[in-house]
Image (spheres, grey):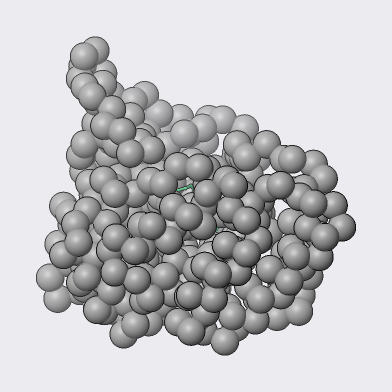
Amino acid sequence: MNQIINESKSFIQEQINTKQNPLLLSYNKISKVYAFTNENIYGYMSKLDFANKGNALSVMASGDHPFNLALYGINNIDTFDINALTEYYALGIKRSAILAFDYLNYIAFMNKLLDKFLSLNELNDLINQITPYMETKHRIYWKSLIDYYHILQKESNISTNLFHLFLLDPNKIDGYMVNTYLKSEKNYNKLRNIIGKTNINFEQCDFNNITNTFNNQYDFIILSNILDYLYINLGSGWKYDKLKHLEDSLTPLLKENGIIALDYIYNYFNALECEYKKNIINFSDITHNDLTTEKIITFQNVFVNKIIHNSEAAILIKHK
Ligand SMILES: C[S@@+](CC[C@H](N)C(=O)[O-])C[C@H]1O[C@@H](n2cnc3c(N)ncnc32)[C@H](O)[C@@H]1O
């Protein structure tokens, strides 16, 4: 616990000193967390069959993947992320806020929390409102981080909102269109009623270690677009045999009829040009013709809360 708090403090200090570029192509144990998903999760989850399904293994990221899975009735969710801070934001802040507030107040809370000009007093006030809903571990973490932020403020009068140092894309209050749980008050209330009873566990873990870290069998494995970045160190051009190998290595983690959402594909189809994205997974050489047993599900292309007209996004799926 002390270690993650100290590492987070150093990270915050580093962000203040270097004003790091938020556009990142590599992910680390301590890095900025996505405020909300940048995928149309509603687009693909609404096309999957969740009937009689009970568990999933998912990337944590902003928390939106597990929260949507919970809404669709998955009540045991193991999550992982290479970035240890995702747990503290997703389960510490977002889950506590869902438990604390109704739909409109949740949106107001998140808007306020991410407000560029949030004052220290306002930050304290917001965190105090959700603290009773936090697990002890998350409560200790956020108290330590906010106390530290107070000290930094006193020393050098930092004008940046703590969450702008902690999060990627914090200015955009996204998610209403792409998260099933935020699409309507009814959906939100449903999630709010079940989120407290849903087990969401977290392991800080690199995707490459996933089979050593988890030994359960799941109905769903949700990988977001991790594969876009996984082999980035090899340079571009990795081939289908690598994907096949990866699928085979994950199969023991799947129940019979289980599904792996292998990769989220932004801008999969351009309707104006009637053209499919050439490389299905970024930085790979994998084209449509290479695919064998995988399937593609297409849906409306929505990015940062805007519909991208004349185009479709997709998800690459593997069934057991
Ligand atoms: C790939 S990113 C992109 C954002 C994503 N499209 C979304 O909607 O949230 C999602 C998450 O994957 C995590 N991630 C990236 N590479 C990883 C790896 N090799 N192992 C584990 N997690 C990884 C990042 O830390 C981040 O939280």
User: Can the viewer see residue 148 in this picture?
Assistant: yes
Would you place residue 166 above or below residue 1 in this image?
above
In this rendering, the count of numbered labels is: 0
Q: Quadrant of the N terminus?
A: bottom right
Residue at 22% across / 70% down in the picture? 189
Would you place residue 255 above or below residue 62 in this image?
below
Between 117 and 175, the one lying in front of the other is 117
Between 245 and 168, the one lying in front of the other is 168
Report x, y in % for residue 138: 58, 78
Residue at 76% across / 79% down in the picture? 2
Report x, y in % for residue 220: 30, 65
Q: Residue furthest right?
A: 155
Residue at 62% across / 32% down in the picture? 235
Between 270 and 109, the one lying in front of the other is 109
Residue at 21% across / 14% down in the picture? 272
Report x, y in % for residue 149: 74, 63
Query: As drawn, is 319 to the left or to the right of 207?
Result: left
Would you place residue 275 above or below residue 5 in this image?
above
